[in-house]
Image (spheres, rainbow, N blue to C red):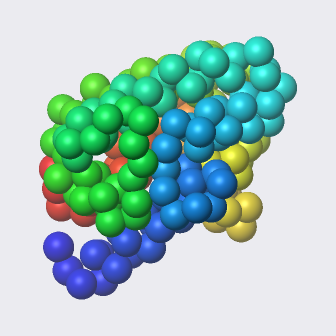
Amino acid sequence: MSRLESELWLSKSRKDFAGFDVNNDGYIDQSDLAAQAEAVATAFGKSDQATAFLEANQPWFEVMMGSLGKGLDGRVNFEEYTGYWGEASEAQFKEVLEPWVASVLALAQNPSRLTKAEFATLSKETGGAHDDEVDGVFKALDGDTKGYLSPDEFARFMLEQFSEPGSF
Protein backbone atom coordinates (compact mmCIF):
# COMPACT_ATOMS: atom_id res chain seq x y z
CA MET A 1 0.00 0.00 0.00
CA SER A 2 1.34 3.43 -0.91
CA ARG A 3 1.75 6.19 1.64
CA LEU A 4 -1.13 8.13 0.04
CA GLU A 5 -3.42 5.07 0.21
CA SER A 6 -2.42 4.59 3.84
CA GLU A 7 -3.11 8.24 4.70
CA LEU A 8 -6.48 8.14 2.92
CA TRP A 9 -7.44 4.92 4.70
CA LEU A 10 -6.48 6.40 8.09
CA SER A 11 -8.44 9.56 7.34
CA LYS A 12 -11.50 7.52 6.38
CA SER A 13 -11.02 5.35 9.45
CA ARG A 14 -10.95 8.41 11.71
CA LYS A 15 -14.30 9.49 10.27
CA ASP A 16 -15.72 5.97 10.69
CA PHE A 17 -14.45 5.76 14.26
CA ALA A 18 -15.96 9.14 15.11
CA GLY A 19 -19.31 7.90 13.77
CA PHE A 20 -19.22 4.98 16.20
CA ASP A 21 -17.83 7.02 19.12
CA VAL A 22 -21.19 8.67 19.76
CA ASN A 23 -20.28 10.11 23.17
CA ASN A 24 -16.92 11.42 21.87
CA ASP A 25 -14.86 9.93 24.69
CA GLY A 26 -12.22 8.44 22.36
CA TYR A 27 -13.53 4.87 22.69
CA ILE A 28 -16.20 2.64 21.17
CA ASP A 29 -18.19 0.58 23.65
CA GLN A 30 -21.65 -0.91 24.06
CA SER A 31 -23.21 2.44 25.00
CA ASP A 32 -21.96 3.96 21.74
CA LEU A 33 -23.43 1.10 19.72
CA ALA A 34 -26.78 1.47 21.49
CA ALA A 35 -26.86 5.25 20.95
CA GLN A 36 -25.94 4.87 17.28
CA ALA A 37 -28.58 2.18 16.75
CA GLU A 38 -31.23 4.42 18.29
CA ALA A 39 -30.15 7.41 16.19
CA VAL A 40 -30.11 5.43 12.92
CA ALA A 41 -33.47 3.73 13.54
CA THR A 42 -35.06 7.03 14.58
CA ALA A 43 -33.66 8.83 11.51
CA PHE A 44 -35.32 6.18 9.35
CA GLY A 45 -38.58 6.72 11.26
CA LYS A 46 -38.42 3.22 12.71
CA SER A 47 -37.31 3.69 16.31
CA ASP A 48 -39.06 0.42 17.17
CA GLN A 49 -36.33 -1.38 15.19
CA ALA A 50 -33.39 0.07 17.13
CA THR A 51 -32.93 -3.17 19.08
CA ALA A 52 -32.70 -5.22 15.88
CA PHE A 53 -30.17 -2.76 14.45
CA LEU A 54 -28.12 -2.90 17.67
CA GLU A 55 -28.17 -6.72 17.60
CA ALA A 56 -26.86 -6.60 14.03
CA ASN A 57 -23.90 -4.52 15.25
CA GLN A 58 -23.06 -7.12 17.89
CA PRO A 59 -21.30 -9.71 15.68
CA TRP A 60 -18.52 -7.40 14.48
CA PHE A 61 -18.15 -5.88 17.94
CA GLU A 62 -17.87 -9.34 19.52
CA VAL A 63 -15.33 -10.53 16.93
CA MET A 64 -13.31 -7.33 17.27
CA MET A 65 -13.33 -7.48 21.07
CA GLY A 66 -12.38 -11.16 21.03
CA SER A 67 -9.53 -10.62 18.59
CA LEU A 68 -8.22 -7.82 20.82
CA GLY A 69 -8.46 -10.03 23.92
CA LYS A 70 -11.17 -7.89 25.53
CA GLY A 71 -14.54 -8.72 26.98
CA LEU A 72 -17.80 -7.32 25.64
CA ASP A 73 -17.86 -4.81 28.47
CA GLY A 74 -14.58 -3.37 27.22
CA ARG A 75 -13.94 -0.47 24.95
CA VAL A 76 -11.80 0.11 21.86
CA ASN A 77 -9.65 3.13 21.07
CA PHE A 78 -8.79 4.36 17.57
CA GLU A 79 -5.48 2.48 17.29
CA GLU A 80 -7.12 -0.81 18.29
CA TYR A 81 -10.01 -0.16 15.89
CA THR A 82 -7.75 0.45 12.90
CA GLY A 83 -5.50 -2.44 13.90
CA TYR A 84 -8.47 -4.79 13.92
CA TRP A 85 -9.83 -3.68 10.52
CA GLY A 86 -6.34 -3.64 9.01
CA GLU A 87 -5.77 -7.29 9.96
CA ALA A 88 -9.24 -8.83 9.54
CA SER A 89 -9.70 -11.29 6.69
CA GLU A 90 -12.27 -10.99 3.92
CA ALA A 91 -14.17 -13.93 5.43
CA GLN A 92 -14.34 -12.13 8.79
CA PHE A 93 -15.62 -8.99 7.08
CA LYS A 94 -18.34 -10.84 5.25
CA GLU A 95 -19.41 -12.77 8.32
CA VAL A 96 -19.89 -9.70 10.47
CA LEU A 97 -21.12 -7.26 7.82
CA GLU A 98 -23.89 -9.44 6.35
CA PRO A 99 -26.21 -9.12 9.38
CA TRP A 100 -25.51 -5.38 9.53
CA VAL A 101 -26.30 -4.86 5.84
CA ALA A 102 -29.54 -6.84 6.26
CA SER A 103 -30.49 -4.70 9.27
CA VAL A 104 -29.93 -1.48 7.31
CA LEU A 105 -32.04 -2.75 4.44
CA ALA A 106 -34.77 -3.70 6.94
CA LEU A 107 -34.94 -0.01 7.90
CA ALA A 108 -35.40 1.05 4.26
CA GLN A 109 -38.85 1.57 2.74
CA ASN A 110 -38.16 -1.31 0.38
CA PRO A 111 -35.93 -3.92 2.07
CA SER A 112 -34.54 -5.03 -1.28
CA ARG A 113 -32.84 -1.70 -2.00
CA LEU A 114 -31.43 1.48 -0.50
CA THR A 115 -32.34 4.82 -2.08
CA LYS A 116 -29.97 7.76 -2.28
CA ALA A 117 -31.96 9.57 0.44
CA GLU A 118 -31.73 6.50 2.70
CA PHE A 119 -28.01 6.19 1.97
CA ALA A 120 -27.59 9.88 2.90
CA THR A 121 -29.51 9.35 6.16
CA LEU A 122 -27.37 6.34 7.05
CA SER A 123 -24.17 8.24 6.19
CA LYS A 124 -25.18 11.19 8.34
CA GLU A 125 -26.00 9.04 11.36
CA THR A 126 -22.93 6.80 11.14
CA GLY A 127 -20.28 9.34 10.23
CA GLY A 128 -19.97 8.09 6.65
CA ALA A 129 -19.99 10.28 3.56
CA HIS A 130 -20.74 13.94 4.27
CA ASP A 131 -23.66 15.66 2.55
CA ASP A 132 -21.39 17.11 -0.13
CA GLU A 133 -19.94 13.64 -0.84
CA VAL A 134 -23.15 11.57 -0.92
CA ASP A 135 -24.00 12.22 -4.60
CA GLY A 136 -20.59 11.17 -5.88
CA VAL A 137 -20.32 8.16 -3.59
CA PHE A 138 -23.84 7.01 -4.43
CA LYS A 139 -23.25 7.34 -8.19
CA ALA A 140 -20.04 5.34 -7.90
CA LEU A 141 -21.82 2.58 -5.97
CA ASP A 142 -24.90 2.41 -8.17
CA GLY A 143 -23.15 0.30 -10.79
CA ASP A 144 -26.30 -0.59 -12.70
CA THR A 145 -27.51 3.07 -12.58
CA LYS A 146 -31.00 2.11 -11.40
CA GLY A 147 -31.07 4.91 -8.84
CA TYR A 148 -30.80 2.69 -5.79
CA LEU A 149 -28.31 0.32 -4.21
CA SER A 150 -29.06 -3.38 -4.37
CA PRO A 151 -28.11 -5.53 -1.38
CA ASP A 152 -25.02 -6.68 -3.30
CA GLU A 153 -23.93 -3.14 -4.20
CA PHE A 154 -24.38 -1.99 -0.62
CA ALA A 155 -22.57 -5.04 0.82
CA ARG A 156 -19.66 -4.53 -1.61
CA PHE A 157 -19.43 -0.89 -0.52
CA MET A 158 -19.36 -1.86 3.16
CA LEU A 159 -16.70 -4.48 2.51
CA GLU A 160 -14.53 -1.90 0.74
CA GLN A 161 -15.34 0.80 3.30
CA PHE A 162 -13.80 -1.08 6.20
CA SER A 163 -11.00 -2.98 4.50
CA GLU A 164 -7.53 -1.55 4.28
CA PRO A 165 -6.48 -0.91 0.65
CA GLY A 166 -4.78 -3.96 -0.80
CA SER A 167 -5.80 -6.24 2.07
CA PHE A 168 -7.87 -8.54 -0.17
> What residue is drawn where x is 73% and y is 61%?
131
Q: Is residue 61 visible?
A: yes
Q: Position of residue 165 (x, y in %)?
A: 25, 62
Answer with left or right where residue 139 lies relative to residue 135: left
The residue nearer to you, when weighing 81 against 43, is: 81
The residue nearer to you, when weighing 159 against 41, is: 41
34 to 157, vertically: above or below: above
154 to 161, vertically: above or below: above
Answer with left or right where residue 112 lies relative to residue 1: right
The residue nearer to you, when weighing 66 against 155, is: 66
> What residue is drawn where x is 59% and y is 39%?
31
Q: Position of residue 1 (x, y in %)?
A: 17, 73
Q: Position of residue 26 (x, y in %)?
A: 52, 63
163 to 1, vertically: above or below: above
Q: Position of residue 129 (x, y in %)?
A: 61, 59
> What residue is drawn where x is 42% and y is 35%?
73
Answer with left or right where residue 2 lies relative to residue 111: left
Numbered label tally: 0
Give the farthest residue toward the bottom: 3
Quadrant of res 145: top right
Give the farthest residue toward the right: 45
Quadrant of res 119: top right
Answer with left or right where residue 38 lies relative to residue 11: right
Quadrant of res 35: top right
